[in-house]
Amino acid sequence: MDAALLRRLTPEVLGVLVGRGADLAAAEDAVQEALVRAVGVWPVDPPRDPKGWLVTVAWHRFLDATRADTARRRREDLVVEEPVPGPVSGADDTLQLYFLCAHPSLTPSSAVALTLRAVGGLTTRQIAQAYLVPEATMAQRISRARRTVSGVRFDQPGDVATVLRVLYLVFNEGYSGAVDLAAEAIRLTRQLAAAIDHPEVAGLLALMLLHHARRAARTAPDGSLVPLAAQDRTRWDTTLIAEGVRILQAALARDRLGEFQAQAAVAALHADAPTSGETDWVQIVEWYDELARLTDSPVVRLNRAVAVGEADGPRAGLAALAVLDPALPRHAAAAAYLHERAGDLATAARSYADAAQRAGNLAERDHLVRQAARLNAATGRG
């Protein structure tokens, strides 16, 4: 296989597809798939016209992807929004693609980014936001990942941990409302749980179900966000909650704790509380301590600070928040909430306004703007 020839032809083939009307991102994905196929085919059946061969295969891949995307959108329009409880049937090859893109030749972060872009359908900007890096940095990471796998055989699928990370990020994008991918992520995780006896796969599935159970209560009729404490808990899907708790309990009983099981335990404690005031915040802080030990994630420590504010009072929460980087996503929103609970309404209003400027989506921004306006009105500043 002439790797230099493939590298030389790649921009030429890409230019042909774009010239035929393909958008750049879709053309890059199609060319990448053609290169992967060339690696497997050319050593035993070299083409007489390499460029023509690549153009033909890439164009067909682009058309197939376009048709598949259209069909997927049609299915999404027809399928009931909530995922059906229990095992799924009719498995397709999407999950296999997740494993193939999570190739051992890539670092875990690059494999996740490539899979989200090539299979999950997320934009480079959405992936960058999930990883807390600039969009240009993520674009370079994805491009490097594509170049890395362009000269390798896809006969060594990636590991389960990388695939779980991808599914989790896809679910989060769908749950945030930016892209409706939550039900698809649950469907694929159900498939994985049916195929692999792994406590973290079960933990991720439980986490998704417990979060998805609250989806109907997360927005008001006008589309505005409803915070967890203010949600109408009668609108929570008790069937999904019961299934999620059952799956989580079975996973925890195996005594192989992982981050998804710990996150699911936090979600289960929220789901178990009849009212917001009856939430077992002390136990939630303990689970966040476990999560911090497992992940050393600053986002986990931020969520822990809020939980400490509920368990031990807002001043304790602010003290826990003070040691974290103010540039963290939702740091300002957490500070605003804790300052409001501490009675410092003026500082809380400023923090809500600051958080609104950093919000990742329109619904979140509008919610934070309303919170700032409410406190400004209460302090006579509005």
Image (cartoon, rainbow, N blue to C red):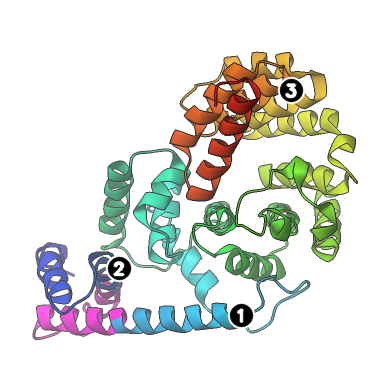
- How far apart are labels 2 and 1 at the CA level? 23 Å
Q: Residues within 10 Å of mark 3 (few under 14, many from 20)?
A: many
Residue 284 appears at what percent x and percent y? Answer: 79, 33
Q: Along the line of sight, which residue is nearer the eye, 329 or 357?
A: 357
Q: Amino acid at mark 2?
A: Asp
User: What are the residue bounds of the magenta stretch?
Assistant: 34-62
Q: Amino acid at mark 3?
A: Gly
Q: Is residue 339 magenta?
A: no
Residue 37 appears at what percent x and percent y? Answer: 29, 76
Residue 239 appears at what percent x and percent y? Answer: 84, 65
Residue for badge 3? 309
Contact? badges 3 and 1 (CB < 8 Å): no
Write down the quadrant of residue 62 in the picture. Answer: bottom left
- 124 displayed left or right of 295: left
Residue 207 appears at what percent x and percent y? Answer: 71, 53
Residue for badge 2? 29
Residue for badge 1? 91
- For image coordinates 86% across by 58% down, the residue present is 246
Q: Along the line of sight, which residue is nearer the eye, 250 or 119?
A: 119
